[in-house]
Image (tube, helix red, strand yellow):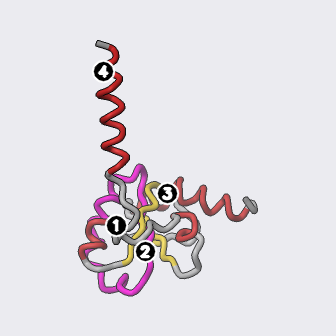
Amino acid sequence: MTVKIFGFLLAAILVVTSCKTAGTGIAPIADIREVVNSSDATLVDVRIPEQYEAGTAKNAINIPLAELQNTIDSLKGKKIVVFCNKGIQADQAMEILKKNGIEAYDGTSWKNVKAIQDEKSSGK
């Protein structure tokens, strides 16, 4: 019985790992650290103004998620990093931006983006 289970698990692992292909045609995912620290990136905090004012990443602008669709034209042609408190609103913002053809990156939370910035400034 244990030999059959082991054999099944081994076969399952081989099937899963064999499905990976070298050339999928998908562009490589950019390193979020590089994008956040890029001089041409615009950091967008999509939380409500009160949350933004309580603390955010350095040089971030505040465009609440509810207003994002109305500001799409001002974001076109820019490299955008979106973030919020825990990443839920950032995920929704990513959908809106990608749907409108904007180069967007998910910074997840403002604390994550701030930590990336702090990492660079401390020379790591």
73 over 121 or under it: above or below = below
Frontmost residue, 66 versus 29: 29
Cα–Cα span, label 2 and label 4: 48 Å
Q: Amino acid at mark 2?
A: Ile
36 to the left or right of 74? right
Mark 2, residue position:
80
Q: CA distance from mark 4 to mark 1?
A: 32 Å
- Identify residue for label 1: 24
Three-letter amino acid code at the position of disc 1 = Thr
Q: Secondary structure at mark 4?
A: helix
N-terminal-most mark, 1 or 2: 1
- Can residue 44 be spotted in the picture? no
Tag 1 secondary structure: loop
Dividing the image into 4 quarters, which one contains the C terminus? Answer: bottom right
Label 3 or label 4, whichever comes before in sequence order: 4
Nearest the eye: 72 or 101: 101
Q: Which residue is mark 4?
A: 5
Task: Tell me: 107 left or right of 2.
Answer: right
Coordinates of residue 31 in the picture (x, y in percent): 52, 65
* Residue marked by disc 3: 110
User: Mark 3: which amino acid?
Assistant: Trp
Q: Residue at x 48, y 68 (%)?
A: 30
Q: Is residue 91 magenta?
A: yes
Q: Using the numbered discs, state the Cα–Cα distance from disc 3 to disc 4 in whole angstroms.
A: 45 Å
Q: Position of residue 86 (x, y in %)?
A: 41, 49
Magenta span covers which residues?
65-93
Q: Are marks 1 and 3 in contact (CB under 8 Å)?
A: no
Label 1 crowd (10 A; few <14 / some 14-19 / many >=20):
few
